Image (cartoon, rainbow, N blue to C red):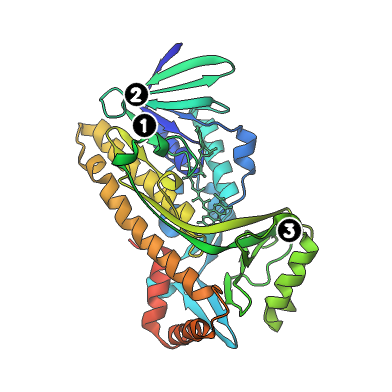
Amino acid sequence: MNQLRTQVAIIGAGPSGLLLGQLLQKEGINHVILENRSQEYVLGRIRAGMLEQPTVETLREAGAGERLESEGLKQTGYNLLWGKGRTRIDFDLAGKTATVYGQTEVTRDLIDAREKSGGITHYEVKNVALHDFDSENPRVTYEKDGEKYEVSCDFIAGCDGYHGVSRKSVAADRIDTYEFAFPFGWLGILADVPPVSDEVVWLNHPEGFVMCSLRSKTRSRYYIQVPIDEDINEWNAERFWDEFKRRLPDDLANKLVTGPALEMSIAPLRSFVAEPMRFGQMFLVGDAAHIVPPTGAKGLNMAIADAKQLFEGLKQFYGNGERKLLDSYSDQALDRIWKAVRFSWWMTNLMHKFSDDLFARKLQIAELEYVAESKAAQTTIAENFCGLD
Ligand code: RFL
């Protein structure tokens, strides 16, 4: 067994692990990232694309904000459409902006910054296991290229996503989980075509939700609601474009440019929270502890917020030995997370078709009409969408 020593062992090189690594690197706190996939695979993942203002600021602080600054598209509002109605939610109501910039680009920038600063990431590690995280001397074991390794450390950051090993390492009687699965998913397409709108559009269509989103001025990300058991193999780009266009109002349908799919997939919509997020010297970060439906664009932003908060706790500890911020990590993070879970759940309920029940649809329309008429309601949405302080 090869023996290694570090201060913080980070499991997972997704956005939360990479960000935490970069912030620690800048602060001179010794750490290592262990990732079970290849760097190529990590760089190829296509997911979120809407960054809240604090997320942008944190990426800048980590030294990964330069390209985001020049290529990110500032958003000052987004649009809700239903039947014949529509309203624009002006982010000025919350005094904030949001930025369109793909998660793939965020990952690339963090990896580039890491390479420049000499931070160590071990990719394609196998059989990662967490040990003794209730003691002051936790350990992580793993295998790489047929060799066995043991890293002893002060802290473990479980940044390994929903399917990772960190949360699963906790005894069942020490962790509570809360889960809600929606009976539908989003069928998404990514294509190099100019977006139908330079602002995000959410449409409550009688046959199911539609979202017009963008990654740049030449790259669009569009979604339609499909049943949860829909088979992706039944879909190709042509069928997607037909169905998408059919659900769009004329003004947007007329602007639609179609093209080959760079990616098509179905994302399930569900909410999941694990409590607490700290177990002795081990902390859960990002998707390892919580999942939200993409309605609300919170997943990536929550992961970044957790990583930043944990970093502040570690910085305080290594600065003056205090554990105050580490001790409040879980409670503070969960407070933020439940608010995001609530907003994403509410938005999902407002914008999707749940059944053929016309009563339910009438209530959705009444609520949307109310939003269109009420500055207070629009402010509530703007505040939640742009991120609560
Ligand atoms: P990630 O990104 O899942 O990264 C976890 C990393 O850990 C690695 N890993 C392990 N490494 C070592 N040992 C193990 N045993 C390991 N098990 C796993 C994984 O390979 C991976 O590299 O978690 P993180 O860092 O917390 O980041 C979270 C975000 O990625 C996530 O919240 C968002 O992408 C969610 N999400 C969306 N969020 C939004 O805000 N807006 C969106 O539009 C949006 N669309 C999406 C999404 C997530 C999707 N997924 C997960 C299916 C669309 C999709 C399809």
State the image quarter where residue 81 is shown.
Answer: bottom right
Picture disc at residue 95: none
Number of numbered discs present? 3
Q: Position of residue 96 (x, y in %)?
A: 41, 67
- Report the residue at 48% width, 76% height from top: 89
Q: Position of residue 160 (x, y in %)?
A: 47, 38
Is the C-beta of the residue carrying label 2 under 8 Å from the nearest atom of ligand 1?
A: no
Picture disc at residue 153: 2
Q: Position of residue 374 (x, y in %)?
A: 40, 86
Q: Foreground residue, 48 or 283? A: 283
Three-letter residue code for mark 1: Ile
Picture disc at residue 192: 3
| Cα separation between marks 3 and 1 | 40 Å
- Report the residue at 47% width, 72% height from top: 349
| Cα separation between marks 2 and 1 | 7 Å
Q: Left of 52 or right of it: where is 67? A: right
Q: Left of 267 or right of it: where is 331? A: left
Asked whether the residues under the numbered discs 2 and 1 touch, taking CB atoms below 8 Å apart as contact, a structural biologist would say yes
Q: Tag 2, which secondary structure?
A: loop
Q: Position of residue 293 (x, y in %)?
A: 49, 60
User: What residue is disc 1 on?
Assistant: 156
Q: Tag 1, which secondary structure?
A: strand
Q: Is residue 223 above or below residue 379?
A: above
Three-letter residue code for mark 3: Asp
Q: Is the residue marked by circle 1 packed among few (<14), some (14-19), or many (20+) residues within 10 Å?
A: many
- Report the residue at 51% width, 64% height from top: 295
